[in-house]
Amino acid sequence: MVAHFLIAFAAAALAVGLALLLMRQLERRFGGAGPARGLERGIEPIVFLFRNQVLIDATGPARALLATLPGQGDWQGLASWLAMRLPDFGALLPDLSGAARLEFKERAEGHPLRLLAEDLGEGVIRLTLADPAAENAGILVDSLSLGVMEQELEILRSTMDHSPMLAWRQDRQGQVTWANSAYMDLADARLPDQTQWPLPQIVDLSARPASGGGARRIQVDHDGQSRWYDCHVHEVAEQTVAIALPADAAVRAERALREFVQTLTKTFADLPIGLAIFDRDRNLQLFNPALIDLTGLATGFLTARPTLYAFLDRLREARMVPEPKDYRSWRNQMASLEAAASSGHHVEMWSLPGGQTYRVTGRPHPDGAVAFLFEDITSEISLTRKFRADLSLGAEVLDSLEDAVVVFAANGELLISNRRYGELWGAAAPATLDDHIAVWTQACGQSPGLAALREALHAALPDQPVRGAMAGPAGGLLSWGLRGLSGGRLLLSFAAPMPTPPLAVEPPARTALADPAETARLRRSMSG
């Protein structure tokens, strides 16, 4: 009996040992995922121990959570993270005293979170975090997937924290539930005593549409200065997501552009030249009051931004453009004007039916715009015509003189000469005084009179004219006169001497017999 019992006992022990050995082998082979392994390993809680807001101990999961939280210290990072999820945490935590226990629950649906805060005395506080949805669930997380998610989370967090834009989320009550570093820094700078969660609302979005409509320009005052942002607002998961991009440079550029346009507008308003600027679609964008005065067009018509051809048609109706033979040729002329102005600098003279003369200048501008300048040059044209008439009259008077006249500048340059001078010394007049002296010398040879003229030309002239005589090119006697004009100019004239009067003609003989004594007396007077 005893032997049978021992044999049975040994067989049972051997079976149990083989079973344990088999279970251990299976556990090693399948990575310890068996039910025995799951029962041996428990889920470690998230517990923090703080003394006077200084971390003195924490569990492994708690330290892992602290490592992912932003902030300058453990307590600040954890408090900010908890305040975003537990709105009552910041207000009720200072009430802990003795063995008080406070329990906080997150209000947001879908992400439950429970915090147990215990005051252990001597400034020591124990915080226990728990996820009611995951308690006793024994959830296992793939380390590779968790690492990828943590890496992506770190990239997103660092990107948002180093971004100059303001980014935040707020609920329907207007409380900020999340913000990036730029928002928190600006909130801390503006309201240093109100940076506890929920953060103060820097930008009021209640008066703005919650979604759509593009960016909206907002202004934030700080340190006596205004900061400008382009705010984009979107609705995500029953919360408002706002992103404000810095727009200070754009605001300064727009302000400078407005001031520049105002300066140009004031300048154009004082110009006597009419200005009309058409955009690339040939619609009138800018004009000045002088355009109204010159063209007589109505202000309402110009402010309606007419097209270029409508503008020219209205000018034609007002008889402020040259009148062509037919409308088709006029349209072709205006099309040529527009094409020439858009391709480069173009100038036309318009002789109007009313006797006025306009200078129309077309200039191309960037982005296909064209500017037209209308200038009334009637007085200028009249003055030019009068000046030309005076010049023509003076030249005609000089050419009618019998004397050869020439005028030299102070530097010896030929200014003007008449036709008689060209006939006397040759049609091709040289350009300088020295060249003229060489022509005179070649034509007349060396003579005392020419030497005296050369000396007078190079000497300082008195107030009275200087006169002299020299041999002419044809061998006769030629007189000259030299007179100083204003500006150091010289007037030189050449004239032939007056011819001697002819001898008196003997009176015809008398038909009647003369007295012999009278006849003898006359003969003596004529011979003597």
Image (tube, rainbow, N blue to C red):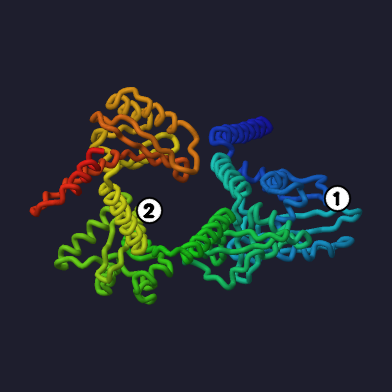
420 versus 392 height, above or below: above
Q: Residue at x 87, y 61 (%)?
A: 99
Tell me the quarter of the picture where residue 456 sits.
top left
Q: Horizontal and vertical percent for residue 438?
A: 33, 26
Residue drawn at x 23%, y 30% as measured from the top left: 474
Marks 2 and 1 sit apart, C-alpha to C-alpha, by 73 Å
Mark 2, residue position:
365
- Residue at 40% across, 66% down: 287
Can see residue 466?
yes
Q: How many marks?
A: 2
The quadrant the C terminus occupies is top left
Q: Is residue 200 above or below residue 512?
A: below
Residue drawn at x 76%, y 52% is: 76
Q: Along the polypeptide, which appears first: circle 2 or circle 1? A: 1
Q: Nearer the viewer, residue 66 or 33?
A: 66
Query: Label 2 neighbourhood size at 10 Å, few (<14), some (14-19), many (20+)?
Result: some
Left or right, 190 with reference to 245: right
Q: Which residue is mark 1?
A: 51
Q: Give the number of the mark in front: 2 or 1.
A: 2
In the picture, residue 353 is in which quadrant? Answer: bottom left
Q: Is residue 136 visible?
A: no
Quarter of the image holding residue 91? bottom right
Going by the image, does 352 lie left or right of 32? Answer: left
Q: Quadrant of the N terminus?
A: top right
User: In the image, what residue type sits under mark 2?
Assistant: His
Residue 238 in the image: state x and y as whole percent: 55, 67
Q: Secondary structure under badge 2?
A: loop
Three-letter code for the amino acid on which mark 1 is drawn: Arg
Q: Tag 1, which secondary structure?
A: strand
Closest to the observer, 33 or 491: 491
